[in-house]
Amino acid sequence: AQKITQTQPGMFVQEKEAVTLDCTYDTSDPSYGLFWYKQPSSGEMIFLIYQGSYDQQNATEGRYSLNFQKARKSANLVISASQLGDSAMYFCAMREARGAQKLVFGQGTRLTINP
Amino acid sequence: KAGVTQTPRYLIKTRGQQVTLSCSPISGHRSVSWYQQTPGQGLQFLFEYFSETQRNKGNFPGRFSGRQFSNSRSEMNVSTLELGDSALYLCASSLGGGGSYNEQFFGPGTRLTVL
């Protein structure tokens, strides 16, 4: 069964520092996608970045990059030059190709950026 | 392009009542998925509808049901409400094609409180 594990319940980082949020996953489907979402206190889930299981290069989107290590089944999110507005919950999620639109989420990491 | 809308945003019900939540997807999107978010269980997949058919279902009791209309708008219904049904209910829409990538766009959620 597919599973996502986020081992950091909370993280505190100084503004402008880089931060890495950990995510490990488990699946038996060779075709899958990994997603990161940001959830501010308002509740809406904001898509940040996607990595496909067959993608050769790590995904990047502006200040966000995904450190994809397939053999280790990890998909860590790296935020460079953190900003106060980055304070939020961050969720790692996975979709198997055979799973239609079902996303399986990790428990999330609450990131707090200190000025 | 308008985003995903959910109504109502907030709802208070008492045990034993039933509730209907609505979700309007992004224009052109044919897939609507529903998720329940609670502090204890995190984000859990409820079900997904594509072209008016339930395509995937999570592990929830039969009290949770849904449907999708020809215009892709979706409703979910919870009957005989229990205290544990208090949660943020998130709806997500996507084009719904196959494969592991199909970005899901989330709505702002409906916060249900059961007293």
Image (tube, helix red, strand yellow):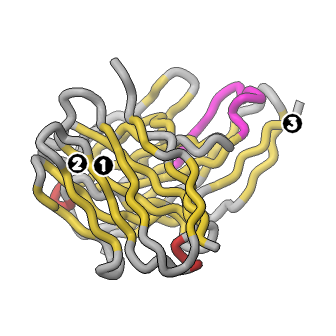
Chain of the residue under the numbered disc 1 shown in the image: A
Where residue B71 appears, as percent x and y from the top left, is 16, 37
Crowding near the residue tagged with mark 3, few <14, some 14–19, many ≥20 C-alpha atoms within 10 Å: some
**Residue where numbered disc 3 is placed:** A114
Q: Quadrant of the N terminus of chain B?
A: top left
Residue depicted at 22% across the width and 48% down the height: B100
Q: Residue at x 54, y 45 (%)?
A: B9
Q: Chain of mark 2?
A: B
Q: Is residue A60 left or right of residue B83?
A: left
Residue A56 is inside the magenta segment: no
Q: Nearer the viewer, residue A85 or A33?
A: A85
State if disc 3 and disc 2 touch (CB < 8 Å): no
Residue B18 drawn at (x, y percent): 42, 70
Of label 3 and label 1, which has the lower sequence position?
A: 1
**What count of labels does the image hold?**
3
User: For the residue carrying disc 2, how many other residues have a C-alpha within 10 Å: few (<14), some (14-19), or many (20+)?
Assistant: many
Mark linked to residue B100 = 2
Circles 2, 1 touching at the beta carbon (< 8 Å): yes
Q: Chain of mark 3?
A: A
Question: Label 2 amino acid?
Answer: Ser
SS class of the residue under badge 1? strand
Q: Calculate the distance from the C-alpha at mark 3 to the C-alpha at mark 1.
A: 32 Å
Q: Are marks 3 and 1 on the same chain?
A: yes
Q: Secondary structure at mark 3?
A: strand
**Disc 2/disc 3 C-alpha distance (Å):** 36 Å
Indicate the amino acid at tag 3: Asn
Residue B14 is situated, as x and y percent measured from the top left of the image, at 58, 73
Question: What's drawn in magenta, residue-wise?
Answer: A76-87
**Residue position marked by numbered label 1 in the rendering:** A33
